[in-house]
Image: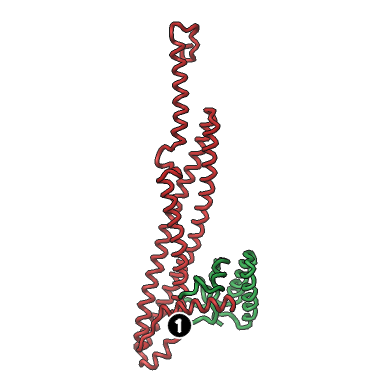
Chain colours: A green, B red
Amino acid sequence: MIVRILSEDQYDLPGKYVDDLNEIDNALVEVVEREDRDEFHRLLKKMLDLVREKGAAVPVDELVESDLVLPDRDLTLEEAEKLFVGEGLLPG
Amino acid sequence: MGMLSRMGIIVKAKMNRIMDSTEDPRETLDYSYEKQMEMLRNVKRGVVEMVTTKRRLELQAAKVRENIGKLDGQARKAVEMGREDLARLALERKQGAIAELEGLDQQVEGLELEQEKLTHAEQRLQAKVQAFRTKKEVIKAQYSAAQAQVRIGAALSGISEEMGDVSLAVERAENKTETLRAKAGAIDELVSTGVLDDPTSGKDSLDHQLEQVSASASVESELAAIRGSLPSAERKSLPEGQS
C-alpha cells in the first residue's frame, strides 16, 4: 500500500498496518472534537511515525499514485478542525 | 469520515484542478509536463519570497535587540541623574521590546521550517519531473495513442498527485509568508511613526529628555561656578578653582 505524507515523501507500507492507521485516525477525529491539543499532536506524530518506521520510502524517481494521504507534520488543530468541517482547506 | 479520507479528497481535488485531460493522451503528456515546469517555477519563487521575508524579520529582530541594549543604557543614565521616572519609562519600553523580540524569533523559526519543507518539495518535484520526462519521451516514441492511454495512466496520476502535494505546500507557505510580511510591514510602520523607536534613526524622546536633564544639570553647575567666582562671594569653593 502506497502512503503519502504531505510535503514529505511516499512510503510503501505493508497492508497489515492499515488497521493501526485507521485506529489512530478515528482517535484523531475524537481528539479534534474535544479540542485536545496535546493529544492531537501526539496522535498525529504517532500516525506519521508508524508510516515512516514501518514503511519503505518510495524511490524519488518513481511515479505512483498513493492509496492513502496523510497530513503535513505541522498540521495545526485549527487546520484539522477546518478539515473536518469542510471549510477552508477544501478547494471549492 | 476520518482525517485520512479527507486528506485524500483534498489532494485529489487539487490533482484534478491541475490536470485537464485532452483527447490525445500523448498531448496530455506534453500538457502535464508544461504544468510541471510551471509548478517548479512556482516553488522556486516561493522559496525566494520566503528567504526575503525571513531576512526582513531577522533585520527587525536585530534592530529590536539593539534597542533593548540602548534602553538599558538609558535606564542606567536616568538613575544616575536621579530621574527614576525616566528610568521606569525606559525599562517599561525594554519589556515591550523583549516581548517583540521573542515574537520575531519565533516567526523566523517558523519560516525556517517552512523553507526547509519547500526546498525538499522542490528537490522532489525536480526528480519526479525528470523521471516523467524520460517516461513521456519513451511512450510518445513507442506507442500509438490507444496504447499510450494505458501506459501513461500511472505515471500521470503519480506526477499529478505530487503536484497536488506541492501546490498545497506552496499555498500554505504563501499564506504564512503573507501574514508575516504584513506583520513586518506593520512593525516598520510603527517604527516610522515613532510608536516603536528605531535606534538606528538617532535620538528618541527619551534621549531628548535625558539630554535636557543633563543640560539643566550643567546649567546649574555653571551657574554655581559663576556665583562662586563673583568677588562678592564669601569663599572660592569651586572644585575647579581649588587647584
In the rendered structure, the answer to whether residue B112 lies left or right of residue A52 reads left
Q: Is residue B71 visible?
A: yes
Secondary structure under tag 1 reads helix
In the rendered structure, the answer to whether residue A18 lies left or right of residue B214 reads right
The answer to which quarter of the image holds residue B144 is: bottom left
In the rendered structure, the answer to whether residue B223 lies left or right of residue B141 reads right
Where's residue B152, x and y in %? 42, 87
Question: Residue at label 1?
Answer: B157
Q: Residue at x 35, y 89 (%)?
A: B24
How many numbered marks, from 0 up? 1
Where's residue B6, x and y in %? 54, 77
Q: Nearer the viewer, residue A54 or B188?
A: B188
Q: Nearer the viewer, residue B216 or B110?
A: B216
Whether B5 is drawn above or below B76: the answer is below
Where's residue B149, x and y in %? 40, 90
Check the picture and name the quadrant holding the N terminus of chain B: bottom right
The answer to which quarter of the image holds residue B2 is: bottom right
Q: Residue at x 52, y 76 (%)?
A: A10
Q: Is residue A11 visible?
A: no
Where's residue B23, x and y in %? 35, 89
Near mark 1 (Cα within 10 A), the count class, few <14, some 14-19 or many ≥20, is some
Whether A87 is drawn above or below B188: the answer is below
Q: Residue at x 45, y 44 (%)?
A: B195
Q: Indicate the chain on which mark 1 is placed.
A: B
Whether B33 is drawn above or below B69: the answer is below
Inspect the image, locate mark 1, and give the three-letter code of the amino acid beneath it: Ser
Whether A74 is drawn above or below B198: the answer is below
Q: Nearer the viewer, residue A8 or B203?
A: B203
